[in-house]
Amino acid sequence: MDIDDISGGSVGYFWASHSKRINFRRRSESGYLKVNPTGQVEVQTLEESPFDSFGSADSPGIPKSIFASTPAGGALVVDIFRQTSNIRWGGAKASTHSFFAHALIMGVDDNAQDPRFSYFSTFVPGIQDWAGVRTIDEERKNDDAQRIQSVSLQVRSGAPQEVRLNASTKFELSWHWQVSGSADNRSIYAPVSLAVRSMRPKSYRELLSPLHRIQDLVCLALDGFVAADGGRAHLILDPDPRTSPTLWDGRLMAAPPGTTTPKSMTEIPLFSLGDLGGVDALRRWIKIYESHPRAVRPFVSRYRLGATSPEVQLMEVAAGMEYWVASHRRTTSWAKNKRIPLAIAERVGSPFGDWIGDLEKWDTAFWETYNAIKHEANYKPDRYMVSVMAQSGSLLLTAAILNRVAGNKGVSKRIFRSHRTRALGEEASGYVANFSPNPGRKKKKGR
């Protein structure tokens, strides 16, 4: 059973659970299960006693999980975030309850009584260069005229690279491959596998959360939403993990509305996992993300929520900078500089300075634009240059945080010397070189 069996919709019987275990002795409800174009899972059940349910004070709220028995097999709906009801009296329309969720576990049966998990994996094609792993070795032989005479492919497995995220959970970066098709029509599928494994039972969201954080890092490196392509799940009551159920998570596997995908999956990424220090860096990335989300989200949220206006982007980046500096002011000397963008720029150092030009002029241009947008009702900015300043600030904040993840400034050198940032650097440095502060604007204290 996989997503193709459900995506078009399927009828079934459903058991909702508001506790840690699903009680299959309770009466099931008839309904319909499907995956929406946005990747969300939707369950719609029939309300057979609308008079009893109307105005009931005993409604337990959004269920923790829903088990579905469908013609294709058993499925478990988890990470439910919204519930609606449509109660009707008389007429031809039926009363219904609708539930919306982020995830679906397919191919389950009685092992779904306890909807807690010990393992998730997801497969991500196209990120071998970023991850620094390769499952396929290709060798071509040509004749004297450089015409291909033969091609040999070797697909191999290897030991996973592991890092412990906390006392009970570890992350695994590994190789996944499978070969299908007849002898004259072979198909090789060899994506990178990202997995989390826990020694104790965990809820769906608690265990899967690190994979969302790591996906954000991949999206940042490739500048677009990088979708996963399927996955596996282990329930704690799973009798045979080798036949583990199939995982569908809309946030991992479906591009959110308004987002873009990378222009090319073969283009050299902005930075690689090796630039950050390998798999050990993922633990540091997740820790910083969860400890300082207000500093990280300004440069990763566009891969989840889509692009915003230049003015909003600049304000979000500036707020992230203010938070990042304030969170370090008591413990570090670099954060005591009251010129906040300049404090971060000087911390990042020459990689950004060589890219942008005059750091002090850039600081003045960025902060003056930010304050004008925030406080001056009559300010009419050049939206293109606001976008350039917002993007330059976003890259600076990105470099500062990734330097922390890597423990050195090597990743910021990679970012500001990348072909991906060259055109922006030329635009931003040219604007800064010709920038003149507005003498009519009152400077804020400390600047």
Image: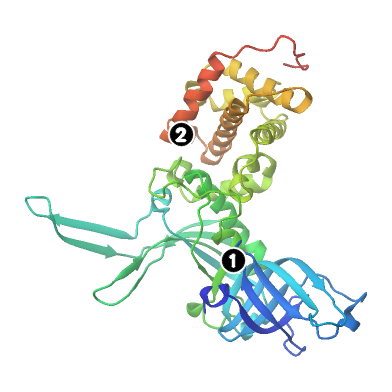
Q: Secondary structure at mark 2?
A: helix
Is 145 drawn above or below residue 51 in the view shown? above
Is 318 drawn above or below residue 276 in the view shown? above
- 341 and 349: which one is in front? 341
Does the rendering let one see residue 339?
no
- 429 and 117: which one is in front? 429
How many residues crowd mark 1 within 10 Å: few (<14), some (14–19), many (20+)? Answer: some
Q: Amino acid at mark 2?
A: Gly
- Residue depicted at x 52% and y 37%: 407
Mark sitting on residue 410: 2
Please tell me in which quadrant of the rendered image residue 148 appears.
bottom left
Looking at the rendered image, the quarter that the C terminus falls into is: top right
Judge left or right: residue 168 versus residue 351. Answer: right
The first of marks 1 and 2 along the sequence is 1
The residue singled out by tag 1 in the image is 198
Please tell me in which quadrant of the rendered image residue 33 appears.
bottom right
Q: Secondary structure at mark 1?
A: strand
x then y, percent, for residue 319: 71, 33
**Identity of the residue furthest to the top in this view:** 439
- Residue depicted at x 47% and y 48%: 262
Q: Amino acid at mark 1?
A: Ser
